[in-house]
Image (tube, rainbow, N blue to C red):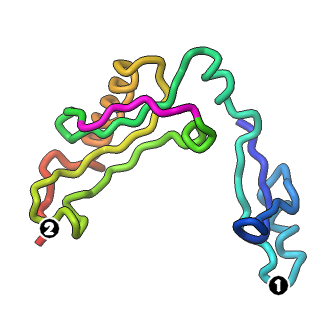
Amino acid sequence: MKKVYAVSAGSYSNYRVNAIFSTRKRAEAFKRAVPDDAYNDIEEYELDPPTADLLKRGYSVWLIHMLIDGNIEIVKKRETRLDDVDYVGYDIWRRSQALAFQGTGIPDILTATVWAKTEKQAIKIVNEHRARLIATGIWEQKEKKVD
């Protein structure tokens, strides 16, 4: 997977990409060439991402919220919008540690956004990831209580 590196400046309606480079090293050199803080951070983009091909082959983006025991709280097929198709990933939402949920008994949850053809396939993908998180100790079977 080929990546490109963009040096940008500004924000909101003034945001713009000033230059795009084939390596991070070249982007950093360009950014250093201007002595003040005119540029934002270097942004990394995948060149020719597989998104269009996935859509053509019948895949959709699915949002899944799964408990540590594998039960599902949310399973939802997302609309095909630019901001939905670019983000795919997993995160453990530590609700037990959030002030709003402390003492309520609401457990932590795995939130996942995945590409799949069906709801069943999406759940299977997330469930396999959940099992890996448990096996590696990243997500403990017994939730710790927060005082």
Q: Up-down: is 125 above or below 67? A: above
What residue is pinned by disc 1?
36
Extreme residue toward the top, this view: 57
> Which segment is the magenta one?
73-80
Residue type, numbered disc 2: Val
Report the quarter where the N terminus lies.
Answer: top right
Percent of width and height locating residue 2: 75, 39
Percent of width and height locating residue 71: 19, 33
Which disc is residue 69 wearing?
none
- Helix, strand or loop at label 2? It is loop
Query: Which residue is at 77% across, 65% downward?
Result: 15
| Of the pair 26 and 89, the residue shown nearer to us | 89
Query: Which residue is at 27% across, 57% downward?
Result: 94
Residue type, numbered disc 1: Asp
Q: Quadrant of residue 73?
A: top left
Query: Which residue is at 73% across, 63% downward?
Result: 42
Q: Is residue 76 part of the magenta span, yes or no?
A: yes
Callout 2: 10 Å neighbours few (<14), some, many (20+)?
A: few
Q: Quadrant of residue 125?
A: top left
Report the quarter where the C terminus lies.
Answer: bottom left
| Of the pair 2 and 78, the residue shown nearer to us | 78
Give the CA separation, mark 1 to mark 2: 45 Å
Percent of width and height locating residue 102: 15, 65
Left or right of 89? Residue 147 is: left
| Of the pair 15 and 20, the residue shown nearer to us | 15
Q: Is residue 107 part of the magenta span, yes or no?
A: no
Q: How many marks?
A: 2
- Helix, strand or loop at label 1? It is loop
Which disc is residue 146 wearing?
2
Lower position in the chain sequence, tag 1 or tag 2: 1
